[in-house]
Amino acid sequence: MKFRARRLEEFSTYAFAELDRVKDEVARTRRVIDMGVGDPDFPPPKEIQGALVVSLGDINTHRYPSYQGNPRLRESIVRFFLNRFKVKLDPDKNVLVLIGSKEGIFHFPLAVLNPGEVGAYTEPGYPVYRAGIVFAGGVPHPIPLREENNFLPDPDAIPENTKLVWVNYPNNPTSAVATYEFFTHLVELAHQRGFIIANDAAYSEIYFGEPPLSILQIPGAMDVAVEFHSLSKTFSMTGWRVGFMVGNPDAVASMLTLKKYVDSGVFGAVQESARTALDNYFILSDDIRKIYQRRVRKWLSALKEAGIEGKNFGATFYVWAKIPENFESSAKFCEHLLRKTGIVALPGSAMGPSGENFVRFSMTLPDRDIEAGISRLLSEKIT
Ligand SMILES: Cc1ncc(COP(=O)(O)O)c(C=O)c1O
């Protein structure tokens, strides 16, 4: 291609084109039940929608938003953090509103990493960690997540010269949650070695037992860590594009400098809705948690009945399952499952080599589709 920069080369090929082809083929004869993508199937609560509509009546809503985020939204973020995590933030120094957490995750290495410096990230994982490091001219260093460590990385696997370490808890795709001990170890290491930790906490409010930790709850974390939050999953707002970054003041200031040249903030009405969501976060997210918990439980027991070992560690709307031994790869198993049942799952290897031999099922589809999936799963011999 003539008008294409070399830096795009490694991002041009799509490894799962074959699976998409099979999906189209199956869709010609039966309804496909898509558990491949994590995108909520129901709208945000009415209160959040209402706040958007009311905000449209205010002229200030339609003007350029503030780069750092509406001060009133930043105050709501501070209150949310205090109530939910017992962590005190300064709205001017520790908080930055993002156009969805993806935007911040991608741009963060550009703000803190120099070309040639090492950025570590866990895999299997959200592909944007690696992409952000590569586009910033950094050297990406994957750290595997393994079942025997409950999908927590071994901090000793972080190279000596690392400047940035991405972790993601609660984790997509494994659903693992971080322990206090793990976060503490990581924070201590960051102090010793001088790297910055970025925890992607996009799923922090999708939990079914103990609420997951923020890394900022660890003593000393504010000196060495930032955390990325999202309203997308918590309040079913994926299309609205709003999230935020909190933590180390230098890192927040660096991101703000960068973003002043990248974008002009989040639409004011969306920020007003985000305020309503966060000011009432527990009430507005509790029904959503219950829906996912019910679905996760149902799907886990169906998998068990079908002879497949699935797991959810009490957070995220994903079920992470081991492929049966007689399949050579997770992609091959996904193809078999799709042909036999019309159910789409994500091959674990799509999110990194250590995801091989696992598949991810997302519970973001209506209950009736999950029920249909269960009866298809149990009426076919899958393993
Ligand atoms: C682990 C993880 N982080 C971040 C995001 C991005 O979320 P958003 O940009 O909607 O806030 C996603 C979306 O799927 C995700 O799975």
Image (cartoon, rainbow, N blue to C red):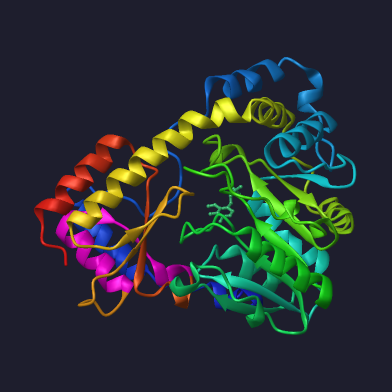
The image quarter containing residue 268 is top right
Q: Report the magenta stretch's main SS.
A: helix
Q: Is residue 359 visible?
A: yes
Q: Is residue 254 magenta?
A: no
**Furthest residue toward front:** 181
Residue appearing at x 69%, y 71% in the figure: 133
Quadrant of the drawing holding the N terminus: bottom right
Left or right position of 194 against 10:
right
Q: Position of residue 241 (x, y in %)?
A: 63, 41
Q: Position of residue 14 (x, y in %)?
A: 44, 70
Left or right position of 243 against 63:
left
The image quarter containing residue 115 is bottom right
Left or right position of 320 against 368:
right
In this orientation, which residue lies closer to the viewer: 74 or 169? Answer: 169
Q: Is residue 43 visible?
A: no
What residue range appears in magenta?
Answer: 330-351
Q: Position of residue 179 (x, y in %)?
A: 60, 59
Q: Is residue 340 magenta?
A: yes
Q: Position of residue 328 (x, y in %)?
A: 26, 80
Taking 157 as reference, is 377 above or below it?
above
Taking 316 as reference, is 286 above or below it?
above
In this orientation, which residue lies closer to the viewer: 264 or 159? Answer: 159
